[in-house]
Amino acid sequence: ALAAPAVALAAPIAPTADPACDLLITNGRVVDGTGAPWFRADVCVADGRINAIQSPGKLAQREAKRRIDATNLVVAPGFIDLLGQSEYAVLVDPRAASKLTQGITTEITGEGSSIAPTDARQIAEGEDYWKHYGVRPDWTDLEGYFRAFEKARPAINLGTFVGAGGVRDLVVGKENRPATADELAKMESLVDTAMRQGAFGLSTSLQYVPGRYASTAEIVSLAKVAAKYGGVYFTHQRSEQREIDASMDEVMTIAREAAIPTNIWHFKTACRENWGRMPEMLAKVAAARSAGLDVAANQYPWTAGMNSLVANLPPWAQEGGAEATLARLKDPATRAKIKEAMRGQDPSWENQFRCAG
């Protein structure tokens, strides 16, 4: 499919003037993103904007710097990737080829952790990564990141959530304990600042450290701050496996108590033992919507998944960060306990190793 600029394509649009087309796409099947049926049309792009959409042949006499015959192709606004992770990658390689070749022109990022807010300690923890790719963060808030983004001039548009897990790491660290009242107030302040600097809302990734250490009440408090600015709440929910019923209840509790539009990322029932349960989960979403909650979900269109190896370790083995985890793995007795946990049946954590078979 050909991705035209991310501007709504409504049929027909009469030309506002009659300039030469920088790009003339002819005979394509136009899908405008509204849900309406496709229609055959020619599309003229001039000065970076859609100038005209007319029936095939109507724009044939226009001069055009470039012409594309889209007879067997679809012409559509650029796609929006609701769960991208390119916020750093586009600073390293602004071409974003892996996005553009899929027709993606806009990405929303910040799953659980976001590119900002951050501080010197977090930046230092990623030093090997920055050295490898050659771009070291010189910002600590979203305002600074967006300056770096604009300077890099990436080929895609980008928006981000403020990640509750990153905020928790910034204030509390990677310890498994409740935030104090003062720490929660600091976290709320960081979310408030991020929202004022352009975040779309709050996000969580509750299967992973340190996000999984946050209580429902803590998330509600942060989500209320995002809601104050018209933000939304997106979540990689706490469980997609054995505890998915309780996890779905938590999603609905946050949506209700924070009065915030809520979306479940990559909605699934993970592990073979849970296959076939999606109708139950969809019914929970439908029931919540019927009860007045603004709750939705999205999926990715493939069956495989990908994650870092550390995600296969039990949460207690990850507490305290990378150095603490490595120390546990180096200790033979602790390493044996980790192996035992990974082969076990404890439902209190998402055992991806066991699920992988």
Image (spheres, helix red, strand yellow):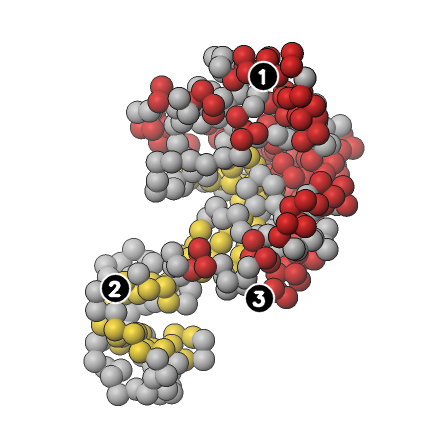
Establish if 289 lies above or below 199: above
Residue 201 image position (x, y, % from top left): 57, 46
**Left or right: 283 with respect to 190?**
left
Task: Choose top left, top right, bottom left or bottom right for residue 8.
Answer: bottom left
x 46%, y 36%: residue? 306
What's the residue type where badge 1 is placed?
Ile
Residue ID for mark 2: 73
The reply, left or right, for residue 110 in relation to residue 321 is: left
In space, the residues marked 2 and 3 are separated at their CA atoms by 29 Å
In which quadrant of the rendered image does the N terminus lie?
Answer: bottom left
The answer to which of marks 2 and 1 sits earlier in the sequence is 2
- Which amino acid, mark 2? Leu
Nearer mark to the viewer, of 3 and 1 = 1
In space, the residues marked 2 and 1 are separated at their CA atoms by 52 Å
Quadrant, the C terminus:
top left
Q: Which mark is residue 186?
A: none
Read off the residue under disc 3: 153
Residue 338: mark: 1
Q: Quadrant of residue 64?
A: bottom left
- Give the secondary structure at mark 2: loop
Q: Residue at x 61, y 61 (%)?
A: 149
Q: Nearer the viewer, residue 39 or 266?
A: 266
Q: Is residue 304 above or below residue 76?
A: above
x and y, in percent, of residue 37 in the image: 23, 59
Does dot 3 land on a helix, a strand or a loop? Answer: loop
**Does 31 sit left or right of 157 as displayed?**
left
